[in-house]
Image (cartoon, rainbow, N blue to C red):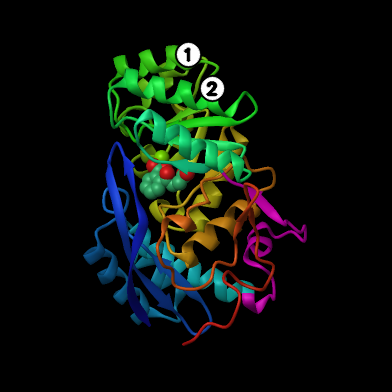
Amino acid sequence: MISSFSLPLADSLDTAAGTITEREGFLLRSRDGLGEATPLPGWTESHEDCRDALETADAALPDWQAALDACEGRPAARHAVSLAHLDAASRVEQEPLYRFLADDDARVESVPANATVGDAPVEGTVESAREAVASGFDCVKVKVGARPVADDVERLRAVREAVGADVELRADANAAWSADEANYVFDELAGVVSYVEQPLAKGDLDGHAALREHDVGVALDETLTEHGIREVLAAESADAVVLKPMALGGIDRAREAALTAREAGVAAVATTTIDAVVARTAAVHLAASLPGMPACGLATAHLLDDDLAPDPAPVEDGEVSVPQEPGNLPGEVEP
Ligand SMILES: O=C(O)CCC(=O)c1ccccc1C(=O)O
Ligand SMILES: [Mg+2]
Protein backbone atom coordinates (compact mmCIF):
# COMPACT_ATOMS: atom_id res chain seq x y z
CA MET A 1 0.00 0.00 0.00
CA ILE A 2 1.26 3.47 -0.88
CA SER A 3 0.42 6.69 0.94
CA SER A 4 1.82 10.17 0.41
CA PHE A 5 2.95 12.85 2.84
CA SER A 6 4.13 16.45 2.84
CA LEU A 7 6.19 17.93 5.66
CA PRO A 8 7.18 21.60 5.90
CA LEU A 9 10.61 22.48 7.23
CA ALA A 10 10.71 24.40 10.52
CA ASP A 11 13.31 26.76 9.06
CA SER A 12 14.16 26.49 5.39
CA LEU A 13 17.71 25.30 4.60
CA ASP A 14 19.61 27.69 2.32
CA THR A 15 22.27 26.08 0.13
CA ALA A 16 24.24 26.98 -2.99
CA ALA A 17 21.84 24.74 -4.93
CA GLY A 18 18.70 26.46 -3.63
CA THR A 19 16.45 26.56 -0.60
CA ILE A 20 14.69 23.49 0.77
CA THR A 21 11.34 24.46 2.30
CA GLU A 22 9.36 21.21 2.45
CA ARG A 23 9.74 17.49 1.85
CA GLU A 24 7.13 15.44 0.05
CA GLY A 25 7.23 11.70 -0.30
CA PHE A 26 5.59 8.31 -0.03
CA LEU A 27 5.35 5.46 2.44
CA LEU A 28 5.26 1.91 1.12
CA ARG A 29 3.70 -0.65 3.47
CA SER A 30 4.16 -4.29 2.66
CA ARG A 31 2.63 -7.01 4.85
CA ASP A 32 5.30 -6.64 7.53
CA GLY A 33 7.67 -3.91 6.42
CA LEU A 34 7.64 -0.14 5.99
CA GLY A 35 9.69 1.91 3.51
CA GLU A 36 9.93 5.60 2.61
CA ALA A 37 10.59 7.35 -0.69
CA THR A 38 11.21 11.08 -0.38
CA PRO A 39 12.47 12.22 -3.77
CA LEU A 40 14.53 15.37 -4.08
CA PRO A 41 14.59 16.36 -7.76
CA GLY A 42 18.19 17.08 -8.80
CA TRP A 43 19.28 14.22 -6.53
CA THR A 44 16.65 11.63 -7.41
CA GLU A 45 13.82 11.05 -9.87
CA SER A 46 10.78 13.37 -9.90
CA HIS A 47 7.79 12.75 -7.62
CA GLU A 48 5.76 11.54 -10.58
CA ASP A 49 8.40 9.02 -11.68
CA CYS A 50 8.78 7.89 -8.09
CA ARG A 51 5.04 7.31 -7.67
CA ASP A 52 4.83 5.39 -10.99
CA ALA A 53 7.69 3.10 -9.98
CA LEU A 54 6.23 2.53 -6.50
CA GLU A 55 2.85 1.60 -7.96
CA THR A 56 4.45 -0.99 -10.24
CA ALA A 57 6.56 -2.27 -7.34
CA ASP A 58 3.58 -2.47 -4.97
CA ALA A 59 1.63 -4.49 -7.54
CA ALA A 60 4.56 -6.93 -7.84
CA LEU A 61 4.72 -7.69 -4.09
CA PRO A 62 5.35 -10.12 -2.46
CA ASP A 63 7.86 -10.74 -5.24
CA TRP A 64 10.57 -8.50 -3.78
CA GLN A 65 12.98 -8.99 -6.65
CA ALA A 66 10.36 -7.92 -9.19
CA ALA A 67 9.49 -4.95 -6.98
CA LEU A 68 13.15 -3.87 -6.78
CA ASP A 69 13.59 -4.36 -10.52
CA ALA A 70 10.60 -2.07 -11.15
CA CYS A 71 12.52 0.73 -9.40
CA GLU A 72 15.82 0.50 -11.27
CA GLY A 73 16.96 4.03 -12.20
CA ARG A 74 14.49 5.52 -9.66
CA PRO A 75 16.60 5.75 -6.51
CA ALA A 76 13.98 7.12 -4.10
CA ALA A 77 11.44 4.48 -5.12
CA ARG A 78 14.07 1.76 -4.84
CA HIS A 79 14.99 3.11 -1.40
CA ALA A 80 11.41 2.54 -0.21
CA VAL A 81 11.16 -1.00 -1.59
CA SER A 82 14.58 -2.04 -0.31
CA LEU A 83 13.83 -0.60 3.14
CA ALA A 84 10.40 -2.28 3.42
CA HIS A 85 12.09 -5.57 2.53
CA LEU A 86 14.96 -5.15 5.00
CA ASP A 87 12.54 -3.98 7.71
CA ALA A 88 10.41 -7.09 7.24
CA ALA A 89 13.42 -9.41 7.13
CA SER A 90 15.02 -7.98 10.28
CA ARG A 91 11.67 -8.25 12.13
CA VAL A 92 11.50 -11.93 11.23
CA GLU A 93 15.00 -12.33 12.70
CA GLN A 94 13.96 -10.24 15.74
CA GLU A 95 17.01 -8.02 15.21
CA PRO A 96 17.38 -4.26 15.02
CA LEU A 97 18.00 -3.32 11.40
CA TYR A 98 21.61 -2.28 11.96
CA ARG A 99 22.54 -5.66 13.41
CA PHE A 100 20.74 -7.48 10.60
CA LEU A 101 22.72 -5.39 8.06
CA ALA A 102 26.04 -5.95 9.78
CA ASP A 103 25.32 -9.65 10.33
CA ASP A 104 27.01 -9.19 13.67
CA ASP A 105 25.82 -9.24 17.32
CA ALA A 106 27.77 -6.17 18.45
CA ARG A 107 25.55 -3.64 20.22
CA VAL A 108 25.93 -0.04 19.03
CA GLU A 109 24.33 2.57 21.30
CA SER A 110 24.91 5.70 19.23
CA VAL A 111 26.61 7.17 16.17
CA PRO A 112 28.34 10.57 16.04
CA ALA A 113 26.61 13.31 14.07
CA ASN A 114 27.57 16.64 12.58
CA ALA A 115 25.45 19.75 13.01
CA THR A 116 24.23 21.27 9.73
CA VAL A 117 24.48 25.06 9.42
CA GLY A 118 22.82 26.67 6.39
CA ASP A 119 23.99 29.64 4.36
CA ALA A 120 23.71 32.91 6.33
CA PRO A 121 25.73 36.08 6.88
CA VAL A 122 28.78 35.81 9.17
CA GLU A 123 26.99 36.64 12.44
CA GLY A 124 24.16 34.17 11.88
CA THR A 125 26.58 31.45 10.80
CA VAL A 126 28.70 31.94 13.92
CA GLU A 127 25.65 31.97 16.16
CA SER A 128 24.31 28.68 14.73
CA ALA A 129 27.73 27.03 15.03
CA ARG A 130 28.11 28.22 18.64
CA GLU A 131 24.67 26.88 19.53
CA ALA A 132 25.50 23.52 17.94
CA VAL A 133 28.75 23.23 19.91
CA ALA A 134 27.01 24.32 23.13
CA SER A 135 24.50 21.50 22.65
CA GLY A 136 27.32 18.95 22.34
CA PHE A 137 28.28 18.65 18.66
CA ASP A 138 32.00 18.36 18.01
CA CYS A 139 31.60 18.48 14.24
CA VAL A 140 29.85 21.28 12.35
CA LYS A 141 29.15 21.37 8.62
CA VAL A 142 28.58 24.82 7.11
CA LYS A 143 26.85 25.38 3.78
CA VAL A 144 28.94 27.54 1.45
CA GLY A 145 28.91 28.50 -2.24
CA ALA A 146 25.85 30.75 -2.11
CA ARG A 147 27.90 33.97 -1.78
CA PRO A 148 31.27 35.22 -3.04
CA VAL A 149 34.15 32.92 -2.03
CA ALA A 150 35.88 35.62 0.04
CA ASP A 151 32.70 35.87 2.15
CA ASP A 152 32.63 32.12 2.68
CA VAL A 153 36.27 32.19 3.77
CA GLU A 154 35.39 34.93 6.24
CA ARG A 155 32.41 32.95 7.56
CA LEU A 156 34.47 29.82 8.15
CA ARG A 157 37.36 31.70 9.77
CA ALA A 158 34.88 33.41 12.09
CA VAL A 159 33.33 30.06 13.01
CA ARG A 160 36.75 28.56 13.70
CA GLU A 161 37.58 31.52 15.90
CA ALA A 162 34.29 31.15 17.79
CA VAL A 163 34.35 27.38 18.38
CA GLY A 164 38.05 26.86 19.07
CA ALA A 165 40.47 24.27 17.78
CA ASP A 166 38.77 21.11 19.04
CA VAL A 167 35.68 21.16 16.84
CA GLU A 168 35.85 19.60 13.39
CA LEU A 169 34.59 22.01 10.71
CA ARG A 170 33.43 20.94 7.29
CA ALA A 171 32.05 23.00 4.42
CA ASP A 172 29.55 21.93 1.76
CA ALA A 173 29.65 23.89 -1.51
CA ASN A 174 27.00 21.83 -3.33
CA ALA A 175 28.97 22.05 -6.60
CA ALA A 176 28.98 25.86 -6.70
CA TRP A 177 32.60 26.67 -7.49
CA SER A 178 34.83 26.96 -10.53
CA ALA A 179 38.32 25.44 -10.27
CA ASP A 180 39.78 28.92 -9.60
CA GLU A 181 37.33 29.61 -6.82
CA ALA A 182 37.93 26.21 -5.26
CA ASN A 183 41.71 26.64 -5.45
CA TYR A 184 41.42 30.00 -3.71
CA VAL A 185 39.21 28.64 -0.92
CA PHE A 186 41.36 25.53 -0.41
CA ASP A 187 44.46 27.72 -0.07
CA GLU A 188 42.74 30.00 2.42
CA LEU A 189 41.13 27.33 4.54
CA ALA A 190 44.01 24.94 5.23
CA GLY A 191 43.89 24.24 8.97
CA VAL A 192 40.40 25.74 9.22
CA VAL A 193 38.22 23.02 7.69
CA SER A 194 38.87 19.29 7.49
CA TYR A 195 37.15 18.85 4.15
CA VAL A 196 34.94 20.55 1.60
CA GLU A 197 31.99 18.60 0.30
CA GLN A 198 31.40 18.81 -3.45
CA PRO A 199 33.41 21.92 -4.33
CA LEU A 200 33.08 21.43 -8.12
CA ALA A 201 30.49 20.21 -10.63
CA LYS A 202 29.35 16.64 -10.07
CA GLY A 203 30.81 15.31 -13.31
CA ASP A 204 34.28 16.74 -12.68
CA LEU A 205 36.23 13.71 -11.44
CA ASP A 206 39.59 15.06 -12.65
CA GLY A 207 39.05 18.53 -11.18
CA HIS A 208 38.35 17.03 -7.78
CA ALA A 209 41.37 14.76 -8.04
CA ALA A 210 43.55 17.83 -8.74
CA LEU A 211 42.13 19.69 -5.72
CA ARG A 212 43.43 16.95 -3.44
CA GLU A 213 46.91 18.50 -3.69
CA HIS A 214 45.79 21.04 -1.06
CA ASP A 215 45.81 20.50 2.70
CA VAL A 216 42.01 20.40 2.82
CA GLY A 217 40.18 17.17 2.06
CA VAL A 218 37.77 16.62 -0.83
CA ALA A 219 34.47 14.88 -0.08
CA LEU A 220 32.13 13.91 -2.91
CA ASP A 221 28.36 13.85 -2.59
CA GLU A 222 26.45 14.91 -5.75
CA THR A 223 29.10 13.14 -7.88
CA LEU A 224 27.75 9.81 -6.64
CA THR A 225 24.41 10.47 -8.34
CA GLU A 226 26.30 10.49 -11.65
CA HIS A 227 29.37 8.27 -11.18
CA GLY A 228 29.50 4.96 -9.34
CA ILE A 229 31.76 4.56 -6.32
CA ARG A 230 34.23 2.49 -8.34
CA GLU A 231 34.72 5.29 -10.88
CA VAL A 232 35.27 7.80 -8.09
CA LEU A 233 37.85 5.53 -6.47
CA ALA A 234 39.58 4.74 -9.77
CA ALA A 235 39.93 8.47 -10.52
CA GLU A 236 41.26 9.10 -6.98
CA SER A 237 38.85 12.02 -6.76
CA ALA A 238 37.95 11.91 -3.07
CA ASP A 239 39.26 11.64 0.48
CA ALA A 240 35.73 10.93 1.65
CA VAL A 241 32.37 10.07 0.13
CA VAL A 242 29.03 11.30 1.44
CA LEU A 243 26.40 8.62 1.08
CA LYS A 244 22.73 9.54 0.86
CA PRO A 245 20.67 6.36 0.76
CA MET A 246 17.71 8.18 -0.86
CA ALA A 247 19.92 9.32 -3.76
CA LEU A 248 21.78 6.01 -4.10
CA GLY A 249 18.75 3.73 -4.28
CA GLY A 250 18.62 2.37 -0.73
CA ILE A 251 20.56 1.63 2.43
CA ASP A 252 21.72 -1.65 0.90
CA ARG A 253 23.40 0.19 -1.99
CA ALA A 254 24.77 2.87 0.34
CA ARG A 255 26.24 0.17 2.58
CA GLU A 256 27.94 -1.56 -0.36
CA ALA A 257 29.38 1.78 -1.46
CA ALA A 258 30.67 2.47 2.06
CA LEU A 259 32.39 -0.90 2.26
CA THR A 260 33.94 -0.44 -1.20
CA ALA A 261 35.19 3.03 -0.26
CA ARG A 262 36.67 1.83 3.00
CA GLU A 263 38.53 -0.97 1.27
CA ALA A 264 40.23 1.73 -0.84
CA GLY A 265 41.08 3.79 2.24
CA VAL A 266 38.41 6.41 1.53
CA ALA A 267 36.19 7.51 4.42
CA ALA A 268 32.42 7.11 4.14
CA VAL A 269 29.91 9.45 5.78
CA ALA A 270 26.17 8.72 5.89
CA THR A 271 23.65 11.54 5.60
CA THR A 272 20.00 12.07 4.77
CA THR A 273 18.34 14.31 2.22
CA ILE A 274 16.28 15.69 5.15
CA ASP A 275 13.99 12.70 5.02
CA ALA A 276 11.04 11.82 7.23
CA VAL A 277 11.47 9.57 10.26
CA VAL A 278 11.33 6.23 8.42
CA ALA A 279 14.22 6.95 6.06
CA ARG A 280 16.14 8.99 8.62
CA THR A 281 16.06 6.11 11.09
CA ALA A 282 17.16 3.74 8.34
CA ALA A 283 20.17 5.99 7.69
CA VAL A 284 20.97 5.76 11.42
CA HIS A 285 20.85 1.95 11.19
CA LEU A 286 23.10 2.12 8.12
CA ALA A 287 25.68 4.18 10.02
CA ALA A 288 25.41 1.92 13.08
CA SER A 289 26.05 -1.14 10.89
CA LEU A 290 29.47 0.25 9.93
CA PRO A 291 31.87 0.35 12.88
CA GLY A 292 33.89 3.50 13.45
CA MET A 293 31.87 5.90 11.32
CA PRO A 294 33.00 9.54 11.32
CA ALA A 295 30.41 12.18 12.25
CA CYS A 296 27.40 11.73 9.96
CA GLY A 297 24.78 14.16 8.62
CA LEU A 298 21.99 12.51 10.58
CA ALA A 299 20.97 15.35 12.88
CA THR A 300 18.26 16.60 10.53
CA ALA A 301 15.03 15.78 12.44
CA HIS A 302 14.79 19.26 13.96
CA LEU A 303 14.78 20.79 10.47
CA LEU A 304 11.27 19.38 9.96
CA ASP A 305 8.34 21.19 11.53
CA ASP A 306 6.38 17.97 11.84
CA ASP A 307 7.05 14.28 11.27
CA LEU A 308 5.26 11.01 10.59
CA ALA A 309 5.99 9.43 14.00
CA PRO A 310 7.97 10.20 17.16
CA ASP A 311 11.73 10.19 16.61
CA PRO A 312 13.18 6.87 17.86
CA ALA A 313 16.76 8.11 17.30
CA PRO A 314 17.05 11.47 19.07
CA VAL A 315 20.27 13.46 19.08
CA GLU A 316 21.93 14.08 22.39
CA ASP A 317 25.35 15.56 22.96
CA GLY A 318 26.18 15.32 19.27
CA GLU A 319 25.33 11.61 19.07
CA VAL A 320 22.28 9.96 17.52
CA SER A 321 20.89 7.12 19.63
CA VAL A 322 20.39 3.84 17.80
CA PRO A 323 17.03 2.03 18.18
CA GLN A 324 17.44 -1.50 19.57
CA GLU A 325 13.96 -2.89 18.80
CA PRO A 326 13.51 -5.37 15.92
CA GLY A 327 13.34 -3.80 12.46
CA ASN A 328 13.81 -0.17 11.51
CA LEU A 329 11.19 1.93 13.32
CA PRO A 330 10.03 0.45 16.63
CA GLY A 331 6.46 -0.81 16.74
CA GLU A 332 4.13 -2.73 14.50
CA VAL A 333 3.64 -1.89 10.85
CA GLU A 334 -0.01 -1.08 10.24
CA PRO A 335 -1.16 -2.69 7.02
O1 LIG B 1 24.94 16.30 5.70
C1 LIG B 1 24.27 17.00 6.47
O2 LIG B 1 24.76 17.59 7.43
C2 LIG B 1 22.77 17.12 6.29
C3 LIG B 1 22.26 16.85 4.93
C4 LIG B 1 22.57 17.88 3.89
O3 LIG B 1 23.42 18.72 4.07
C5 LIG B 1 21.79 17.84 2.66
C6 LIG B 1 20.42 17.75 2.77
C7 LIG B 1 19.60 17.75 1.66
C8 LIG B 1 20.17 17.81 0.40
C9 LIG B 1 21.56 17.89 0.26
C10 LIG B 1 22.38 17.89 1.38
C11 LIG B 1 23.87 17.87 1.16
O4 LIG B 1 24.64 17.27 1.89
O5 LIG B 1 24.32 18.42 0.18
MG1 LIG C 1 26.42 17.67 0.42
Ligand number 2: quarter of image: top left
Magenta-drawn segment: 91-113
Give the SS element for disc 1: loop
**Amino acid type of the residue that numbered disc 2 sits on in the rendered structure:** Glu
Q: Is residue 323 visible?
A: yes
Report crowding for label 2: few under 14, some 14 to 19, many 20 or more residues within 10 A (C-alpha).
few
Extreme residue in the bottom direction: 335
Magenta stretch contains residue 108: yes
Report crowding for label 1: few under 14, some 14 to 19, many 20 or more residues within 10 A (C-alpha).
few
Magenta stretch contains residue 25: no
Residue 274, relative to residue 138: is it above or below?
below
What residue is at 40 percent from the left and 20 percent from the top?
154
Query: Residue 112: percent from the left, percent from the top?
Result: 63, 46
- Quarter of the figure that contains the N terminus: bottom left
To which residue does mark 2 refer? 161
Q: Between residue 204 and residue 25, name the one nearer to us.
A: 25
Give the SS element for disc 2: helix
**Amino acid type of the residue that numbered disc 1 sits on in the rendered structure:** Glu
Determine which of the numbered discs, if any, sits on residue 213 in the image: 1
